[in-house]
Image (tube, rainbow, N blue to C red):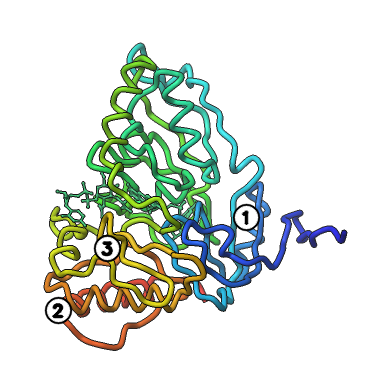
Amino acid sequence: MRAAPVSRTGARVERLPLARFTTLGVGGESEVWFVSDHAQLAEAMEQPYRILGGGSNLVIADEGVPERVIRLSGPLAERDLEPDPHLSTEDEIVTGWVGGGVPLPGLIRQLQKLGLSNLEGTVGIPAQVGGAVWMNAGTRYGEMFDGLHTIEIVTPQETRQVMPDDLQWGYRDSGIPRNHVVSRVRLRLRRSTPEAVLEKMEFADQARKGQPKMKTPGCAFKNPGGVSAGRLIDEAGLKGTRAGNALIAPEHANFIVNLGGATAADVHALLDTIRERVPVPMELEYELWPERLPAAQSPGRQAADRHQADVHRDGPTT
Ligand code: FAD
Ligand code: EPU
C-alpha cells in the first residue's frame, strides 16, 4: 500500500470522497488536508480552502469542490480539560485548550461525567467543536456560547484569541467570518454534579425524540423569528415530499434525509420546493458546497437569494 503524500510541513494530503465525512453521506472527491498543528494549518491556507468539521451541516456537490478541504486532526483534535488554576474559582472553571477537531458528542459526555455544566444543552449535535462554535450550534436548552472562555481564530494573516464578548454572536451565528478557522477554544464551565448535568441532558435529549434517525444534515432552515421552520414546512403540506432519493422527513419537516443514493441535486430540488411553497422568508441553515445561486423567485426565495449573495461575498477565498 502506498503511503499518503505529505506536504512541506508534514500535513497528510489525500483525494478522498467527501461523502464519508458528512452525515448526509453525499459529496464527491476533493483534496483533503489533515492538519495537526499551526504550521500545517498555515501551509494549507496558502491556497483557496474550505474547512470541514463534523460535516453535519453540509450538502456537498457530487463533483466535490476545487478548493483544498482542511480537516483538523492530531493535537488540534485533542482536549485538555484541566482547570486553569489562575482563572478558575470555587464555582467556575476555565479549561486548558480543546481542539477545534474534537467531536462534540464525546466532549459533552465527558463533561457530564466530570459534573461540569454549561454545555449540556448541546447534547445530540453531531458536530466538531470548531464547527459548533463557528455556527454557535445549540438548542432551546443551551448553545455553544454558554460555555466559551477564549476562542483561537486562525486566518491566512494571523492567529488571534478572542473572548465571546468580542463577537456579535446570536442564534446559529458566532459572528466569526467564513473561512476563519476556529483552531482551539478554552471552555468556561460551572462546577455541578454528574447527576444534575445528566438530568439537564436528558431534558434536552427529549426534544430530539421526534427527529429522524436517517442520514441527514439536520434542520435545513433557521427558525424565522423564533417560529419553527419545521412547523411552517409541515403546514405547507410538504412532509414526505421526495426528489430522487432525498425526502422531506415525515417525522420533522425541517429535516431532509437521504433514502440511500441521494445526490446533492436531489437535496437542492427539495430546498427549492420548500422556498417556493412556504410563504415566510427563511434563511438556509444547510451550507451548500459549492454555493449555488437559485433561479426561481418567490418571497421565501428572495430572502434566500440575499443569504446566498452574502455567502458568495464572504468566501471562500479564491
Ligand atoms: P460542518 O458541517 O463540517 O461545517 C459547517 C460550517 O462550519 C462550514 O462553514 C465549515 O467551514 C465551518 N467549520 C467547520 N469547522 C470549522 C472550524 N474548525 N473553524 C471554522 N469553521 C468551521 N445544529 C444545531 O445548532 N442544533 C441542533 O440541535 C442540531 N441537531 C442536529 C441533528 C442532526 C442529526 C444533524 C445531522 C445535525 C444537527 N445540527 C444541529 C446541525 C449541525 O450539527 C450544526 O450546524 C453544527 O454546528 C455543524 O458543525 P460541524 O462541525 O459538523 O461543521
Ligand atoms: N413542528 C411541527 N411539524 C414539524 C416539525 C415541528 O408542527 O414537522 C412543531 C412541533 O410540534 C413543535 C414546534 O414545531 O410544536 C417546535 O418543534 P421542535 O421542538 O422540533 O423544534 P424546532 O424549532 O423545529 C429546533 C432546532 C433543532 C433542535 C430542536 C430541539 C432550528 C432550526 N431547529 O427545532 O436544531 O434540535 O429545536 O431543541 O433551530 C438544527 O439546527 O439542525 C436542529 C436540528
Q: Disc 1 and disc 2: Cα gap in Å?
A: 41 Å
Does label 1 point to a residue whose CB lies under 8 Å from ligand 1? no
Amino acid type at mark 3: Phe
Report the residue marked by disc 2.
299
Q: Foreground mark, 1 or 2? A: 2
Residue 294 x/y as whole percent = 32, 83
Toward the viewer: 113 or 154? 113
| CA separation in Å, label 3 and label 2 | 15 Å
**In-front residue for pair 3/144:** 3
Is the distance from the Cβ of mark 3 to the nearest ligand 2 atom less than 8 Å? yes
Q: Please give left or right for residue 231 compared with residue 203 in the image.
A: left
The circle drawn on residue 54 is none
* Above or below, 245 relative to 202: below
Alpha-carbon neighbours of circle 3 within 10 Å: few (<14), some, or many (≥20)? many
Near-viewer residue (70 or 263): 263
What percent of the width, then of the height, locates residue 96? 51, 28
Secondary structure of the residue carrying tag 3 is loop
Residue at left offset 22%, top offset 75% = 275
Mark 1 highlights which residue? 41
What kind of residue is marked 2?
Pro
Mark closer to the chain start, 3 or 1: 1
Label 3 sits on residue: 221
Which quadrant holds residue 228?
Answer: bottom left
Q: Quadrant of residue 315?
A: bottom left
**Tag 2 or tag 3, which sits nearer the N-term?**
3
Which sits earlier in the primary sequence, circle 1 or circle 2? Answer: 1
Q: Is residue 214 above or below residue 74?
A: below
